Image (cartoon, rainbow, N blue to C red):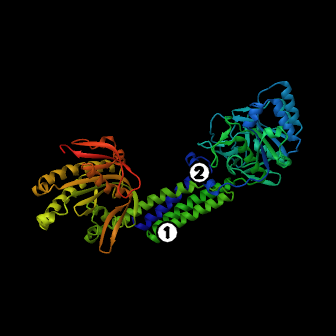
Amino acid sequence: MNHRLQTVIALLLAGLWGAALGYFHLQSNSDLLERMEATLADLRSTIVGVRPPPDIVSIIAIDDRTAAAHGYPLKRDILAQLVTSIGAMRPRALALDILLVDAATEEGDAALEAALKATPSIIAGAATFPKSLQVVKENAEDPLAGIPEAQQLLLPQPRFAEAAALGIVNVATDQSGVPRFIPLFSRAAERLDAAFPLRVASIALDAEPLIENDGIRLSTRRIPTDTGQRLPLTFYGPAGSIRTFSATDALDGKLPTDAITGKVVVIGATVAGGGDVFPTPFDPILPGVEVMSTAITHLIAGDGMVRDTRTRQADAGIAIALPILLVALIAWRRSALGFAVIGLTVIVWAMLNLAAFANGYWLSAALPIAAALPPALIFGAAELRRDRTRARHFADQSDRLQRIEAPGLGEWLARDPAFLAEPVRQNASVVFIDLSGFTGLSEAVGPAAVREILSGFFELIDDETRQHGGAITSFMGDGAMILFGLPEPADDDAARAAACAVRLADRTRSFLAGHPELRRRKIGFKLGAHCGPIVASRLGSGDRQQISATGDTVNVAQRLMEVAASRRAELALSADLLREAGADAAPSQAGQLTGPFETKLRGRSHGITIYAWRGEGL
């Protein structure tokens, strides 16, 4: 199969994948995508930031001050006083986000009934459902078809229901409990009830809501809705973003007139421990009364999010176009320019999506990501494999391999000639080994003997390094630096580094004992081992390069050789390395492990916890 045909098939499959996800999105039938979208919506809300709400709604909070002064829950006669004092200031509408399902004293109930009749009032009911989430189907001919049916309604006492309008206070939350939608209608048996925010907005605007497909109409304003006649919620900021006053001040006649007159006033509980709180992107405990007030503001001001069938259709179109575009760009050019264009495409889409969100259009972010990422990754991986197959002949070019002084990495470089062409930050384990007192040996035994000794020593290091899967990045005079984590980090890097360090100590001790001249001159050795983040890169230029690693982790491992020498040990290991290696990897066999010790390191402002190890009989 030629490459052009493969690309055409990949483009077709990418489009079909996006179309399938788009179809489920239009049906509101993908829990996973909705969960992803909820997280991304919170992220976009945080980026857009806090915004001032229109000065339409004031909240009268039954807060801790009120509970301390009048008890909680408020008695009906106190609640009647609260309604009367607010009603006297002529609000546009007065809403009680309080369930009045039980009867109280006749005197208190009668007082509250009279207070509600004297002011345009709305009281709350609630609905329960047999499932936390019902699958509903849209019907273009019946705008109510997508509204789930309640199992039970919690309605206020009939005397209150006759004195005030009724609204259902249910909210639709995501898996984390964040309110995402307000169901604007609730069905139960043979009745249809408006949501609490919708009923409040209807009375405030003096207009009955007209139900349409994908929306409702209040007076001259059309409010777009999502599937199931749900109003999308976005929050203005943390608790208190909507003007909030204590009910105590209202009862004491201390409310400012401009906070009530001509405003929609919502009475609700914010008392600590009341339980009616929700997490939002701006506040982990936003009172439920502010959630309701946010929805009321959206309906009256028309500043809510637009997420309806049209936006979902736009999402589906993007879900088809974006993966096709990315696959086409990957097939077009896999170079710096090509990847720059791909990155720019993704950035432009993300910025447009964020700009739409900031301007009140809730386009899905999760759907395009889910649609574009798998085809792009799969096709990109296939193309990368194809490119690597074509480039295998570079593995036979000895000039590339000779540029790298890291045994064990040549095979990897042959597969990927661009390996570490740019520095990479990653976790690794580092082992340093060095001979002690070796500097003056060449004057005593001559350069040929020194070369022979060092060759044998380096061969020993190379052998142990290979057996434990490490990479020697450099031989430094009479020592070496070994990395565990190249070409790719692994979970057992630290364990292999610790095992390699102990084996190097054992073999180096035997190696030195086998050379009488080294024994006579008391040549010793020391090792240091540490793990953490490093920056791996190629150093050098032109015809000569080597792989090296830099960073605090490398410096600490090197300084640990000094610590080992100062404690008359062969090996100093950081506590971080042993912790990463695991208890089973502690180098206690055939030697003595002591510690932990807190020690200072030369050139480092803060100390480190280490362990010291030495072989038996030392």
Q: Quadrant of residue 248?
A: top right
Please, is residue 597 above or below residue 3 in the view?
A: above
Contact between labelled residues 2 and 1, with CB atoms less than 8 Å apart: no
Write the residue at 17% across / 63% down: 440
Q: Secondary structure at mark 2?
A: helix
Left/right of residue 265 with respect to residue 239 in the rendered view? right
Spot occupied by residue 159 in the image (x, y as percentages of width and height): 84, 30
Callout 1 amino acid: Ala
Q: Which residue is mark 2?
A: 37
Write the residue at 19% across / 56% down: 460
Tell me if mark 1 has few (under 14), some (14-19) or many (20+) residues whose alpha carbon lies within 10 angstroms of its own. Answer: few
Callout 2 amino acid: Glu
Q: Which residue is mark 1?
A: 340
Q: Quadrant of residue 553?
A: bottom left
Q: Secondary structure at mark 1?
A: helix
Please, is residue 440 above or below residue 585 in the view?
A: below
Per the model, the C-alpha gap separating discs 1 and 2 is 27 Å
Q: Nearer the viewer, residue 193 or 268?
A: 268
Q: Quadrant of residue 335?
A: bottom left
Q: Nearer the viewer, residue 254 or 568?
A: 568
Left/right of residue 248 with respect to residue 498 in the rendered view? right
Question: Label for residue 361?
Answer: none
Q: Residue furthest left?
A: 516
Q: Looking at the figure, which quarter contains the C terminus?
A: top left
